[in-house]
Image (cartoon, rainbow, N blue to C red):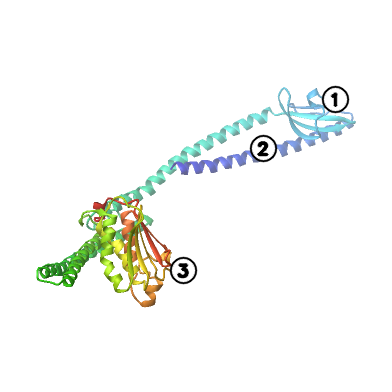
Amino acid sequence: MLSFALLVTFVAGFYAFALYQSIEFTEQQLISGILRDEVARAVDTLERGETPRLPEDTRLYGAPPLEAPPPAMRGLPEGFGELSNNGDFFVHTGAWRGEPLVLTRDQLGFEDTERVFRRITLFSVLAVFFLGLLAGWILARNIMKPVKTLSDEVRKASAARTYEPLSVELTNDEVGELARICDGAMKRLHEALQREKAFTGDVSHELRTPLTVIETSAELLSMTPLSPAQAKQVERITRSAGDMRELMSLFLSFARLSNETTGPEPDSAAGILKAVADTWEPFAAEKGLALVLRREAECPGAYSPVMLGTVANNLVKNAVAYTESGVVTITETSEGFIVSDSGPGLAGDEAARIFEHGVRGSAAVADGSGAGLGLSIVSRICRRSGWTVTAGKAPEGGAAFTVTMTKAVDARRADRL
């Protein structure tokens, strides 16, 4: 409203200024021409030996028989000008008989007219300003009121758990069209959320049942006499089933964006990384790889085993899968950890795109493995937890993934994000 009034006032002020300058220019050109003609007529009259007849507010100075110019009027350049000498005068200077011929006209009448014009202009600009305020208020009331009403309705509908049509009047104008678009978008959003809620509920029910069967069977199997190798395999089954349950809970939590999921007690980064190394050491050994867990510095704090474990598991799994010989190293640092390998590494601009959903590295594309989801999950978990993950080149020549956890959210809350 105020900006509209200021804009109108600026335009009116600019127009008034231009008008004033135009009047000043016209006045100067007009008076200059009149005085020049007066001087020419006066010279003709003087040449005939007659006394020039001048208007009451006009005086003529020059050589005898004319009155001598006052000191302030001597030495004026030829042509038109203005002079202040016991009053304001228009002046036109010429020559007669080798002496300056000065014609003056009192500006009093013109000055009075200019003062009246300036007052009228100022009053007009002020009137335009207040009229602009009034017009802006009326426009804001008539135009912005339905927009604000629509905004309030959309805000209320977005906070509702179920879809309710917008209660605003759907007029045949831009606001009505916007209301219809918002209402349609809200309806589709709620329908999608309902489908997702039903899907996650079905997945949760259908996956928990076979997981429970696997865990129960493994527990019963562990109670029977087993050789050390068999007992180790049963332990791996039990641990993997537990990991699957926690991952399922994590992914469902991602889908629901709820606070319903609970997780195991927070642990140190060293403890979680050791568990990950123990899990993948047998797979690395089968490929003839060395899996090394080293500690460069202690990473302080306690972290969610589900969140941090999932991140580390995906990174180590990729390193083991795509490294044919050499070593995979997990390095704990003061700010997080690094997973590096001696594999083929990342080619070209892969480091910048490798965390995108569905993007696979050149090694995965070459052997047809992977779906481009593991590193996307890593990136999502890191963003959700307030961590950062970057990809680069390892000293061994392969890939290196650095996870920084200096801005970690509370570990107990991380499982519920």
Alpha carbon separation for disc pair 2 and 1: 32 Å
Provide residue 337's location: percent of width, then percent of height.
Answer: 35, 57
Mark 2 crowd level (few <14, some 14–19, many ≥20, 10 Å Cα): few
Residue indicated by mark 3: 348
Residue type beneath disc 1: Leu
Q: Is residue 119 visible?
A: yes
Mark 3 crowd level (few <14, some 14–19, many ≥20, 10 Å Cα): few
CB under 8 Å between callouts 2 and 3? no
Provide residue 161's location: percent of width, then percent of height.
Answer: 22, 56
Earlier sequence position, callout 2 versus callout 3: 2
Residue type beneath disc 2: Glu
- Tell whether 142 sits left or right of 307: right
Residue indicated by mark 2: 24
Alpha carbon separation for disc pair 2 and 3: 71 Å
Is residue 354 or residue 141 the one in the foreground? 354
Is residue 410 or residue 257 the one in the foreground? 410
Residue indicated by mark 1: 66
Earlier sequence position, callout 3 versus callout 1: 1
Earlier sequence position, callout 2 versus callout 1: 2
The quadrant of the image that shows the C terminus is bottom left
Element on which disc 3 rests: loop
Element on which disc 2 rests: helix
Q: Is residue 171 visible?
A: no
The quadrant of the image that shows the N terminus is top left
- The residue under the point 31% across, 68% down is 317
Q: Is residue 292 above or below residue 18?
A: below
Provide residue 257's location: percent of width, then percent of height.
Answer: 26, 57
Is residue 5 or residue 43 the one in the foreground? 5
Provide residue 218's location: percent of width, then percent of height.
Answer: 14, 69
